Image (cartoon, coloured by chain):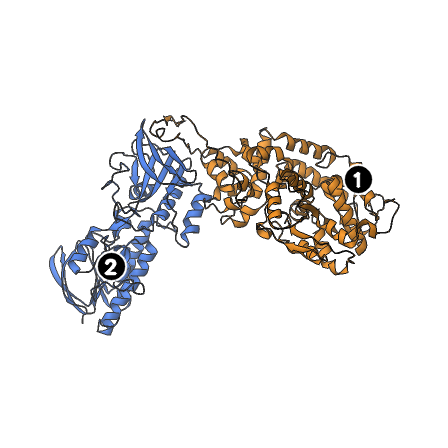
Chain colours: A blue, B orange
Amino acid sequence: MSDTVVVIGGGPAGIEAARNIADLGMKAVLVEERERLGGTPIFESYAALTPHFDDAEEAMDGMIAALAERAGADVRTNSTVTAISGEAGDFVVTVDGPSGSEEVAAGAVVLCTGFTHFDPGRERQIYNYYQYPDVLALQDLEVMLKAHDVRVPSTGKVPERICWVQCVGSRDRNIGNEYCSKVCCGVASKQAIEVRKIAPDSRAYIFYIDMRMYGYWEQQIYWPAQEQYHVQYIKGIITEILEKQGGLIVRGEDTTMGRPMEVAMDMVVLSVGMEPSEGTKTMAGVLGVEQNKYGFIEVARPPLDTVSTNREGIFAAGAALGPADLEDTISSAGAAASKAVALIRRGSPAVV
Amino acid sequence: MPIGGHKQQPVVHELESAIVEGVELTADWNRQLESRVILDYDTTNLFALAELTDAESIEWCYGCGKCVPVCPVDVVGEYGPRKIHRKAQTGFDLLNDPDLWLCTTCGNCLRVCPKEVDMIKIMPAAREAAMAKGNPVPAELQGVFESTFKQGNALGQSARKRAAWTKGAGVPVRQLPKEPGPVEYLFYVEDYWSYHPRGHDAAQACARVFHQLGIDYGILGHEEKTLGDSQRLAGEKGLFEMLVEQVVETLDKYEFKQIVTPDPHGFNALKTVYPKYGHTYDVLHYTQLLAPLVDQLKWTRELDYTVTFHDPCYLGRHHGEYDAPRTLLMAIPGLKLTEMMRCRENGYCCGGGGGGMWLDSHTQNHTTERLSERRVKEAAESGADVLAVCCPYEVSRFEDACKSTNLDGQLRVMDIAELLDEALGGIDAVAPTEDAA
């Protein structure tokens, strides 16, 4: 029985899982494909985290620094897991890194390979994301927000009218993503607040089907956006974005008025949902764990066990399991770490 | 009768074409199916509205729509707080629109609003701003503002006639300007009991009930002026503030422990608005004075009436008093109390509040029936033969409504004071006085 847990993926979930494993007295080997830790918040240039507006880079640097203080945590960047053999308690995990291939003995594995943003230009290209420079996705705007410089790409001007279109790539049978991505309502509202702060003369509109502001997000994000930052919420989703005289016209149905609507915008932000990352899909295959129809990792014993996969000794955490905000991600990372350590302590995977 | 009444078609704010920020929004594709509408989403008017003092909550609406089904105006028209907010998001100018004058400030929307969008503050602020801009005010309402300014009452009557009703009471009514000295209760009669013929009936009945109970009270007589709450809610804050000064000056002259008034609107002014100007009084609605004393009343008649009670918005919803009027009604021998489908917290507005009392013609042009007409139909449906009220606006409103709906042979409208008085024996039960002779 090895006292090592291999954690795959160096984003918020992986860092938190590794830190917990080390704190619980076991050894964590954290394998990250990229050259540094931080995951999507870093590599997609997130500005402020939802819902508390913490600076994303500072928050992730804090997590990374905390992990570095743990002697039990062994971080392997530029590395990938390519094979696994054995069974719970006695896995052999093949890690390919800059110095070659290494076989790591591990009692358990935690998969933290996260999500990717839905590509709004893929499949049904109803929003002309790739054709129109002023149609952005959430992560494109994050880059601008991080630079505190929001500009209409085609003109270089500060936008006077900017809107978000919710549920892009989510809740859509046609696309194949029937699920709600959970975070986009909050992220769009957070971004609207940031835009209104950076560009106080701008007008911000959010077109939605339902605003899904779970729990405290209602009061932390949604109500302040409306009441303090004057963001206009319009019930009715945009189905067409057209270019006219150099500007954009968004068209949809205003469902509260029961009428068609078309509105001129300088800039449109598509509130893209979450899909399983390439890493999640690849690692599911390598590890032999079950995925659901969307490609996210399927938990084997819901709802009271949120992190165990169908393969004993292999756990998953964060957005690899499906759409998750940071709070859910950190929580499931802690749960996965404790179950992995418990399995090793117990010396037997058989207890459910 | 459909619960919702007859609806008006939505008023569509439609432009054939629009140019927004230099972009011409015209297209033929919508016209193939239906006439198209262009919503410009110019929020300038919404922001201007929200910037008015006390009106900031207009922007808090998140469109849940809870307010619309409980809005009494929407029941007979096409109007509701959510709709106001929604239209304001699309460039609608409330300050220049008939909608500005439809709200009766009944408070039913605020009761159910999860975001506490307060139309009771928003509407008066918007009306005040509209008047300040010189936007048109319905003539009938303007006339009342002028009468109130000149005569100190909404009916434009002479101050000298304020106490004329006392002559028919059959019991002495002390007028403090003539008979000064300390008194337990200052009876603030307000306009409609002072001047309206049917108000006189209720005022006289009330005086006889007070007399039988030996209540020590006095009225201000010709010195009384309206407390002006409905004028305030209709947007005339300046007029209201002038009245506050005059009323307070008069009240300062007399020594009393509590103020009693039959008018829930005056009650509201004294209870919640005068204190904001630094003037605090201990105030009761007349039903609140009488309800604890009901066991002392000496009944002489049984009233074989089936009665339903209309909760005044400004006694019930605004101040939570639902029981005192019902306590009085249930104490009357023989009287059976039946409730309308909308009662207590969800009581339907008579249409008279917030200036609605003086906007009947305007409201009629924008609704399918009067709120008072809808209410008397509900009262008749309840099986009642008497509609009991305890707000001076209501007897005349509902009697007119009974006539226009042909219910006048079936449903009588009586103030609770009149019902009490009738069961106590009426004017025949009191000893003749000089005034009565």
Q: Where is residue A69 in the image (x, y as percent from the top left)?
A: 27, 61
Q: Which residue is drawn at 61% across and 36% down?
A: B235
Q: Which mark is residue B222?
A: 1
Kind of element beneath mark 1: helix
Quarter of the picture holding the C terminus of chain B:
top right
Up the image or down, B298 lies above or below B16; here it is: below
Relative to residue B341, is residue A63 drawn left or right?
left
Nearer to the camera, B45 or B169? B169
Nearer to the camera, B307 or A100? B307
Q: Which amino acid does label 1 sit on?
A: His
Q: Badge 1 sits on which subunit?
A: B
Q: Badge 2 sits on which subunit?
A: A
Q: Position of residue A131 (x, y in %)?
A: 25, 34
Quarter of the picture holding the N terminus of chain B:
top right
Q: Where is residue B303 in the image (x, y as percent from the top left)?
A: 73, 54
Badge 2 vs badge 1, beta-carbon distance below 8 Å: no
Relative to residue B88, is residue A120 drawn left or right?
left
Q: Which amino acid does label 2 sit on?
A: Glu
